[in-house]
Image (tube, rainbow, N blue to C red):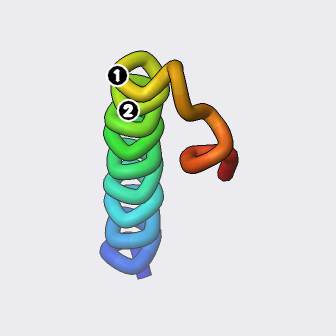
Amino acid sequence: MRYVVYAFCGLGMLIAWMNLTVDGARAKKHLLHAEQPAAYSN
Protein backbone atom coordinates (compact mmCIF):
# COMPACT_ATOMS: atom_id res chain seq x y z
CA MET A 1 0.00 0.00 0.00
CA ARG A 2 2.93 2.32 0.66
CA TYR A 3 4.04 2.03 -2.98
CA VAL A 4 0.64 3.26 -4.17
CA VAL A 5 1.09 6.41 -2.07
CA TYR A 6 4.60 6.87 -3.47
CA ALA A 7 3.28 6.41 -7.01
CA PHE A 8 0.56 9.00 -6.50
CA CYS A 9 3.04 11.46 -4.97
CA GLY A 10 5.45 10.98 -7.87
CA LEU A 11 2.68 11.37 -10.42
CA GLY A 12 1.44 14.55 -8.74
CA MET A 13 4.94 16.00 -8.70
CA LEU A 14 5.41 15.11 -12.37
CA ILE A 15 2.12 16.76 -13.33
CA ALA A 16 2.98 19.86 -11.29
CA TRP A 17 6.42 20.04 -12.94
CA MET A 18 4.86 19.68 -16.40
CA ASN A 19 2.35 22.43 -15.59
CA LEU A 20 5.19 24.71 -14.46
CA THR A 21 7.18 24.08 -17.64
CA VAL A 22 4.10 24.60 -19.82
CA ASP A 23 3.33 27.86 -17.98
CA GLY A 24 6.94 28.96 -18.48
CA ALA A 25 6.80 28.22 -22.21
CA ARG A 26 3.46 30.03 -22.44
CA ALA A 27 4.94 33.06 -20.63
CA LYS A 28 7.84 33.08 -23.10
CA LYS A 29 5.34 32.97 -25.95
CA HIS A 30 3.50 35.91 -24.39
CA LEU A 31 6.77 37.84 -24.20
CA LEU A 32 7.70 36.94 -27.78
CA HIS A 33 4.24 37.70 -29.18
CA ALA A 34 3.35 40.70 -27.05
CA GLU A 35 2.20 42.59 -30.14
CA GLN A 36 -0.60 40.03 -30.75
CA PRO A 37 -1.94 39.02 -27.30
CA ALA A 38 -5.34 37.91 -28.65
CA ALA A 39 -3.78 34.86 -30.34
CA TYR A 40 -2.49 33.60 -26.97
CA SER A 41 -5.38 34.65 -24.74
CA ASN A 42 -5.79 31.24 -23.07
Give coordinates of residue 30: x percent, y percent. Answer: 48, 27
Dot 2: few (<14), some (14–19), or many (≥20) neighbours within 10 Å?
A: few
Q: Quadrant of residue 8?
A: bottom left
Dots 2, 1 in contact, CB < 8 A: yes
Give the CA distance from mark 2 to mark 1: 5 Å
* Residue visible at 42% across and 28% down in the picture: 33
Closer to us: 41 or 17: 41
* Residue visible at 34% across and 71% down in the picture: 7
Residue identifier under label 2: 29
* Apparent side of residue 1 relative to residue 21 in the rendered image (left or right): right
Dot 1: few (<14), some (14–19), or many (≥20) neighbours within 10 Å?
A: few
Q: Helix, strand, or loop for circle 2?
A: helix
- Quarter of the N terminus within the rendering: bottom left
Above or below, 31 against 22 in this view is above
The amino acid on which the numbered mark 2 sits, given as a three-letter code, is: Lys
Residue identifier under label 1: 32
The amino acid on which the numbered mark 1 sits, given as a three-letter code, is: Leu
Give coordinates of residue 42: x percent, y percent. Answer: 66, 52
Closer to us: 8 or 25: 25
Above or below, 41 against 24 in this view is below
Q: Which residue is at the far front?
A: 35
* Apparent side of residue 34 relative to residue 24 in the rendered image (left or right): right
* Residue visible at 34% across and 50% down in the picture: 18
Q: Helix, strand, or loop for circle 1?
A: helix
